[in-house]
Image (spheres, helix red, strand yellow):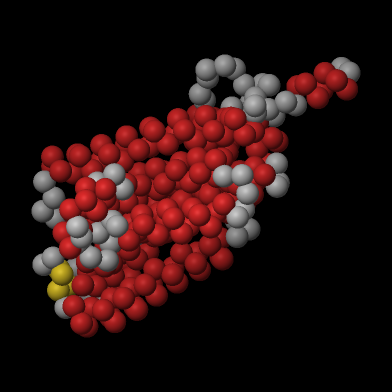
Amino acid sequence: MSLTQRRDDARPERHAKPGRFEADAVMGVVAREWILYGQSWRATTFAAVVEPTLYLLCFGFGMGALIGTLAGFSYIDFLGTGIVAVSVMFQSMMPAVINTFIKRRFLHTYEGILAAPVDVRELVTGEALWLAMRAGVYGCVPLLVAIGFGLQPGPGMLLVPLIAFLAGFAFALFGIWISAVITSVRSMDYVFSGLFTPLFLIAGTFFPLTELPGWVQTAAMANPLYHAVELIRGSVFGGLEAGTALIHVGVLLGFVVLMWNLASFQMRRRVVN
């Protein structure tokens, strides 16, 4: 085999069959991330546990002493369930933006992966799946902390990891798409200030949306974090009607489909084309 032939064979997606989607390729990407996680799990776990705990301590006890109850719940219970969704977003979306950009732009990790029998859609799905699995576990930490502070456990809490996984998958795909859109590290400042902050402030995390103007409440309906917050809060406290729950799940699933297509398309443009 000539040198030219070997270079052609090493081109991204050379070995992938058009239109295929194989679970083995996706799980190969997940396995790679799991192996790398073994080298950094201590720091990742520390950040995942300490940050939401500080939120609960500072806001829960500080503002909770002034507010008392909110929307029929003690403020620390209201905040604790909201922080779960915020933690899921930060555990999935932020690494999807930062790590994916670094791996694509500076480390050229994806060129190596795509030289194997893996196509862009399998790569994107594997990356998002790993982040969703991680977010599904770490996102439940604030709930355990809130239980330690007095939140009453209930059977509905068993649904929280599933909701966290679905929301984490959606936000991970969102982050991968953003990482493929931006062209420099400095662009992340716009993302964090102009996108992350409104997403978690206008989601019913710290206060009910009914306190905001009507147009903001309408805009919040398009915020996937709001639907994740409502699902988690409804599962923990109960009282969420089946029809309303299906709407929230439907919005998250629709967001997953939209972001999966956008992330796959944009990543292919950046890495392959």
| Image quarter of residue 233 | bottom left
Is residue 120 visible from the viewing direction of this image? yes
Is residue 122 visible from the viewing direction of this image? no
Residue 188 image point, x, y percent: 55, 54
Task: Kindly identify the residue that appears in the image at 39 percent across and 33 percent down.
Answer: 258
| Image quarter of residue 6 | top right
Task: Kindly identify the residue that appears in the image at 59 percent across and 17 percent down.
Answer: 17
| Image quarter of residue 179 | top right
Rendered view: 212 above or below 24? below
Task: Kindly identify the residue that appears in the image at 23 percent across and 78 percent down.
Answer: 64
Q: Nearer the viewer, residue 108 or 145?
A: 108
Rendered view: 42 above or below 101? below
Task: Kindly identify the residue that appears in the image at 15 percent across and 43 percent down.
Answer: 244
Q: Nearer the viewer, residue 120 or 216?
A: 216
Q: Quadrant of the N terminus?
A: top right
Q: Residue furthest right?
A: 2
User: Is residue 189 rendered to the left or right of residue 112?
Assistant: left
Q: Nearer the viewer, residue 194 or 35?
A: 194
Residue 212 image point, x, y percent: 20, 60
User: Is residue 183 rendered to the left or right of residue 207?
Assistant: right
User: Is residue 55 rendered to the left or right of residue 269?
Assistant: left
Residue 223 image point, x, y percent: 31, 48
Rendered view: 108 above or below 22? below
Q: Quadrant of the C terminus?
A: top right
Number of numbered discs present? 0
